[in-house]
Amino acid sequence: MAKKKALDFTTDQKRELIDCDTGEMRLSRQCELLSLSKGALYYEPVAMNPLNISIMEFIDRQHIKTPFYGSRKLVVELCKSGYVVNRKRVQRLMRLMGIRAIYPKSSLSRRNKEHKIYPYLLKDVEIVSPNFVWSIDITYIQLRGGFLYLTAIIDWYSRYVLSWRLSNTLDVSFCIEALEEALIKGKPVIFNSDQGSQFTSNDFTRILLNKGIKISMDGRGRVFDNIFIERLWRSVKYEEVYLKGYETGKDAIDGFKNYFPFYNNERPHQALGYKVPYEIHYS
């Protein structure tokens, strides 16, 4: 059936979609259709101590509630809930998850000192229309036997999620894939991110600069510099991830393929006058 449908495409389109040697749809196109990075396609959860998995799930939930808690306070909360853990173990698991408390911003992406850091451009700037400011971030997604990383790009004015990708690594490629998909739908005046190495890399910033997009980066430890995507992560965790308790990467893919259309097209936002992001973004 897939080959028959391909006959309707032009020759150039068929070369892009179909591998000439096997006659099957190219891997890159399959990943694009699934909103999945190539790395996540081969994801197999690393076998971990079930207790560590349970502790990591607790840390993730607590971090969403109180992102300003460091390892000491997390140890206290874990002990209150019956976990016998020391601070060294909690710190190790936080590093694995890419979580740290910074006034109170989490940071899954670490700064590369060799990369150029751009100034924050949005202080006291009034956002009055869609496609004026977009932003990107990465968050940790717990699975039953491991974890993935989720990145998404959101429009500040409409709260519309323009694209998302899952990956089993923090390599820049899945962030670039999300950016390239979002740019098919439009172009912002300003693109905001944190100072993580993914977003300061030449491969990432070059795409923005070539499009004439101004680059803005959060001040270090400034949670409110990218508040809209922080609120998105809270919604994603409480309304989807924690409720579903994904077993596998495929479960996560299926869950987000349903959740983000719901978030964009059906979920009313109080800040939008109880309209949905789609209504505001495309009005």
Image: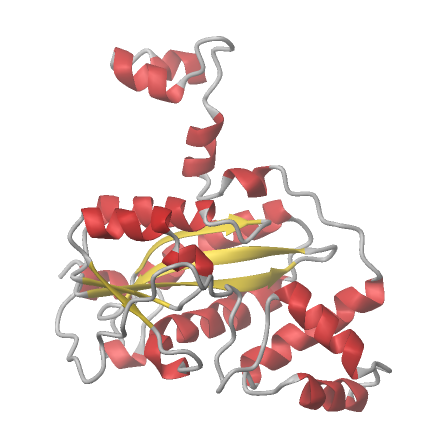
Depth check: 123 or 233 in front?
Answer: 123
Is 274 positioned to the left or the right of 56 in the image? left
Vertical relation: 3 (above or below) 209: above
Q: Is residue 9 visible?
A: no
Is 273 positioned to the left or the right of 236 in the image? left
Q: Residue at x 44, y 81 (%)?
A: 221
> For residue 48, what is the image quadrant?
bottom right
Q: Is residue 27 visible?
A: yes
Q: Residue at x 18, y 61 (%)?
A: 131
Vertical relation: 6 (above or below) 212: above
Q: Position of residue 176 (x, y in %)?
A: 38, 47
Quadrant containing the C terminus in the rendered view: bottom left
> For residue 57, what is the image quadrant?
bottom right
What sort of colour scheme is used for the picture?
A: secondary structure
Is 109 positioned to the left or the right of 47 in the image? left
Q: Position of residue 172 (x, y in %)?
A: 46, 49
Depth check: 105 or 268 in front?
Answer: 105
Q: Residue at x 67, y 57 (%)?
A: 143
Q: Residue at x 46, y 70 (%)?
A: 233
Q: Position of residue 50 (x, y in %)?
A: 83, 63
In the current view of this chain or complex, which residue is farthest to the right?
84
Quadrant containing the N terminus in the rendered view: top left
Q: How many marks?
A: 0
Depth check: 13 or 107 in front?
Answer: 107
